[in-house]
Image: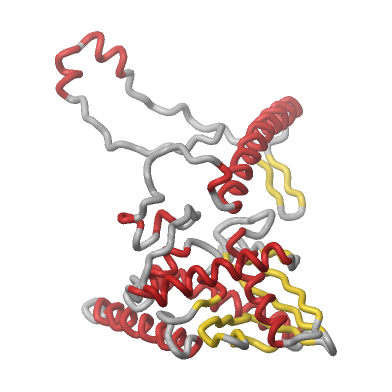
């Protein structure tokens, strides 16, 4: 059986990639290369443009497609919950701009009232977030703007439902429509549309996904220099602030742990069971270590012979 497994894995890879691409092509009738979608204008316009020109999706590696599939899985989870709760939705709604069919948008879930429409956009994350990313907001504002044109007289509301499939965390974030954001997303969509028509690469912008962008090596925005916070998207600034807050919480956590340990040792308790929390104190054997300083002093020549240069490491500091 072991000789067959590699062949099965290879065929699965080929089949999975083909299935995902076929599903996506059904959503984007007319092709991605000539259209401007809601997800295109939320982040870096250069990445969106080059992705269309070079057909990034068709050439995406398997690991990228698997990560993208998390969105479909989260949509199935939400659809199951909405259906069980008796909430009727229209799923994967595709609409275009009344005056330009190259401006398209797909709504994950559309809830319809008598004279109201609510957009529910799905997003997957790798961690809990305290507020929606800027790219999410711009994407939904674009959807709201075009939905208003298609349904004049209707009250349009929207929210983003974010899910971390690893931890099970989820949260809904209301998105408030504003004329300022409307003007911004329409300007961005026009910029991208003009770039596609004229085959002129738009200016890049720093995003939280720059590190995995297929076009980062030729990007003028990715240079090793200090960047002002005002030039970065809000989601990166939010992440930095969250890391700094967690560092402060970690100091408090360690202090509280020390306090609790001293109390339990003092009263002779080694284990506490409470609901779904188990607290225990254990004593580990001392770690055996090599006294390199003493060896270097006593055997300097041998010590130098066995020195080995390690690989460079990258360290993140948030102060």
Left or right of residue 152: residue 19: left
Left or right of residue 62: residue 162: right
**Residue 183 % position (x, y):** 65, 66
Q: Is residue 86 visible in the rendered structure shown here?
A: no
**Residue 197 % position (x, y):** 41, 77
Q: Quadrant of residue 318?
A: top right
Q: If the image is split into quadrants, where does the N terminus sit?
A: bottom left
Looking at the image, is 138 positioned above or below residue 57? Answer: above
**Residue 101 % position (x, y):** 54, 87
Left or right of residue 126: residue 311: left
Colouring used for the render: secondary structure
Give 270 or 111, whichever is nearer the viewer: 111
Looking at the image, is 28 positioned above or below residue 39? Answer: below
Q: Quadrant of residue 282?
A: top right
Give 188 or 22, whichever is nearer the viewer: 188
Q: If the image is split into quadrants, where does the C terminus sit?
A: top right
Residue at (25%, 76%) from the top-left corner? 6
């Amino acid at each position: 059986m072991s000789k067959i497994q590699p062949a099965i894995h290879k065929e699965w890879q080929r089949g999975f990639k083909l299935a995902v691409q076929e599903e996506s092509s059904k959503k984007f009738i007319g092709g991605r290369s000539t259209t401007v979608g809601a997800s295109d204008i939320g982040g870096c316009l250069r990445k969106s443009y080059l992705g269309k020109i070079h057909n990034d999706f068709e050439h995406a590696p398997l690991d990228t497609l698997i990560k993208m599939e998390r969105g479909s899985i989260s949509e199935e989870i939400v659809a199951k919950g909405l259906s069980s709760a008796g909430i009727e939705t229209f799923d994967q709604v595709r609409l275009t701009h009344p005056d330009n069919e190259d401006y398209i948008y797909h709504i994950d879930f559309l809830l319809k009232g008598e004279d109201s429409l609510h957009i529910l956009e799905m997003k997957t994350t790798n961690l809990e977030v305290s507020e929606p990313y800027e790219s999410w907001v711009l994407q939904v504002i674009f959807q709201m703007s075009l939905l208003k044109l298609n349904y004049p007289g209707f009250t349009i509301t929207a929210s983003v439902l974010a899910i971390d499939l690893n931890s099970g965390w989820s949260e809904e974030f209301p998105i408030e429509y504003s004329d300022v954001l409307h003007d911004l997303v329409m300007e961005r969509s026009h910029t991208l549309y003009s770039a596609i028509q004229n085959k002129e690469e738009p200016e890049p912008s720093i995003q939280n996904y720059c590190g995995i962008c297929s076009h980062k090596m030729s990007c003028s925005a990715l240079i090793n220099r200090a960047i002002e916070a005002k030039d970065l998207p809000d989601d990166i600034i939010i992440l930095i602030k969250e890391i700094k807050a967690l560092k402060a919480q970690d100091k408090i956590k360690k202090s509280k742990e020390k306090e609790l340990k001293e109390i339990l040792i003092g009263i002779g308790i080694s284990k506490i069971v409470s609901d779904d929390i188990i607290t225990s104190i254990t004593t580990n054997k001392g770690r055996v270590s090599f006294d390199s300083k003493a060896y270097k002093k006593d055997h300097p020549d041998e010590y130098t012979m066995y020195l080995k240069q390690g690989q460079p490491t990258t360290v993140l500091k948030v102060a």
